[in-house]
Amino acid sequence: MAEIQEDFSVLSYRAIGRNIASRETALTMAEMIFKEFYGEDNFKTQLPLKLTDGGDRWIIEGSRDGYDYPVRDGELHFGRAKIDILKANCQVLKLAIMAY
């Protein structure tokens, strides 16, 4: 895994206790990333999104229940998407979608 080198400007925000990712920023990022990775149609089925304060991160989850969307034999059901975004610098810590 690549090591992230934060610029002094980001480190200085962290030093004074200022987070870059507000609730609104994290939610907007999550929407854009979900659309990019999983597609617009899947994204619409994830609404409403649930945002939780996870301490040092924002946790955003979709609300899709995969069993509500029929699939052909042998295909996976795709359920809730989830993303964790670090408050300090907007780094994506987790990006996943439940499949079964």
Image: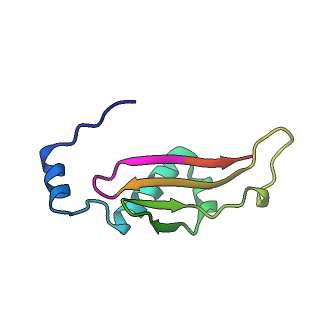
Instruction: Check residue 2 for magenta coloring.
Output: no
Q: Residue at x 47, y 58 (%)?
A: 31
- Residue that lies at the very extreme toward the right in this rendered image: 73
User: What is the tally of numbered marks visible in this picture?
Assistant: 0
On screen, residue 93 above or below 18? above
Q: Quadrant of residue 68?
A: bottom right
Q: In the rendering, at what x and y percent does residue 35 appear?
A: 51, 51
Q: In the rendering, at what x and y percent does residue 3 appear?
A: 31, 33
Left/right of residue 99 with respect to residue 85 in the rendered view: right
On screen, residue 51 above or below 43? below
Q: In the rendering, at what x and y percent does residue 16 appear?
A: 15, 62
Quadrant housing the N terminus = top left
Q: Quadrant of residue 21?
A: bottom left
On screen, residue 64 above or below 98? below
Instruction: Check residue 89 for magenta coloring.
Output: yes
The colouring scheme, among rainbow, by chain, secondary structure or one colour, is rainbow
Q: Residue at x 18, y 50 (%)?
A: 10
Q: Which residues are magenta?
A: 87-95
Q: In the rendering, at what x and y percent does residue 38 appear?
A: 57, 47
Q: Quadrant of residue 7?
A: top left
Q: Residue at x 16, y 57 (%)?
A: 15
Q: Residue at x 21, y 63 (%)?
A: 18
| Nearest to the observer: residue 76 or residue 10 | 10
